[in-house]
Image (cartoon, helix red, strand yellow):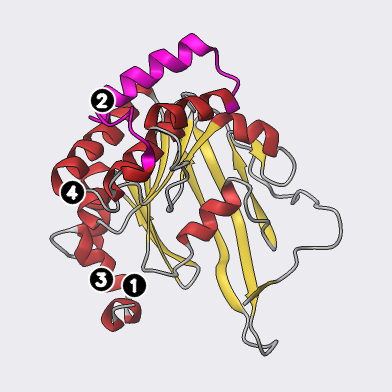
Amino acid sequence: MNEIKTRTKPYEKPENIRYPNSEISIDVIDLKKYYRGKRGYDDVKAVDGISFQVKSGELFGFLGPNGAGKTTTIQMLIGLLKPNDGTALINGYDIHEDLPNIKELIGVCPQEAAVFKHLTGKENISLFGNLHLMPKDEILRRTETLLKTLDLARASKRKAKGYSGGMLRQLNLITALIHDPMILFLDEPTVGMDPRVRRKTWEFIGSLKQVNKTIFLTTHYIEEAEALCDRVAIIDYGELLDIGSPKDLMEKYQTNDLEGVFMKITGRRIMEGI
């Protein structure tokens, strides 16, 4: 599929845009991303006009089956993809106009580990710290703290090409955090981790709320979202289906857990095992 080109005229901020206050970190407003099909008429609506807000200091889960639009949404929010329409404000900065300011505020842990495998763990972390223009002593201090917290200190002197999938994910998380960002985008951060390491990483992600980080989390581990998230949004076919706290959603759909909610409202995709 080919990406449908975005608007040709200059971006114009909508008249009814909701300017955020200090209580809102992410404000998504009618965000859309379409891809053109091979035959020219079977366009795919990857993200189809979604709107929601993420509060400052909130751990916000973004759930959906494969292909639902989760990663596409993140890529628009961090500036890797241009929307076809709509916009979002990250701490008050518009994604169409203020990407340099946004990039100073965010940390991103992508779905695929974004590390250099010919470098050691410490060298990867130092590289990302330098890219953020951090002082050398601050890089060293935060590196030691994060390596110890995530139990990666022993492996940190080895080249990343020898890391397991779970270790690469841990290193990826550290590089996303090294510059102490206000807002974190974590796209399936615990994939490939063994249960023990995953549980420890969950605890670490949950602890970030105590220092007032805003965390935007996608995951396929529904129990992870239920345990960690203040609120979750569920998306499918590019449409936002529902949003609320795990407890409120479980009560609304009369289920014993968040997985039951997920299976009820995502429908056909779950039944087909997509």
Which image quadrant for residue 162? top left
**In the foreground, 191 or 14:** 191
Q: Mark 2 points at which residue?
A: 149
Please provide the residue range marked out in magenta.
131-160
Mark with earlier residue (3, 4): 4
Query: Around disc 3, counting alpha carbons within 10 Å, would you say few (fewer than 14), some (14 to 19), or many (20 or more)?
Result: some
Name the residue type under label 4.
Asp
Q: What element carries label 3?
A: helix
Q: Earlier in the sequence, mark 4 or mark 2?
A: 2
Amino acid type shown at disc 1: Thr
Please name the residue that numbered disc 4 is placed on: 194
Mark nearest the camera among 3 and 2 is 2
- Find out whether residue 159 is within the magenta segment: yes
Dividing the image into 4 quarters, which one contains the C terminus?
A: bottom left
Q: Type of residue at label 3?
A: Met
Structural distance between the alpha carbons of marks 4 and 2: 17 Å
**Residue in the picture at 58% in, 45% down:** 78
Looking at the rendered structure, the kind of residue marked 2 is: Thr
Note whether residue 212 is visible: yes
Distance between the alpha carbons at the discs numbered 3 and 2 = 34 Å
Using the image, determine if residue 53 lies above or below residue 82.
above
The residue where tag 1 is placed is: 266
**Distance between the Cα atoms at labels 1 and 3?**
6 Å
Q: Position of residue 122 (x, y in %)?
A: 40, 26
Q: Measure how far apart labels 2 and 1 are at the Cα level.
A: 36 Å
Return the residue nearer the eye: 252 or 56: 56
- Per the image, the residue denoted by label 3 is 263
Indicate whether residue 199 is drawn in magenta: no
Q: Is mark 2 on a helix, strand or loop?
A: helix
Residue 241, quarter of the rendered image: bottom left
Give coordinates of residue 81: x percent, y percent.
64, 56
Query: Tag 1: Cα neighbours inside 10 Å, few (<14), some, or many (≥20)?
Result: some
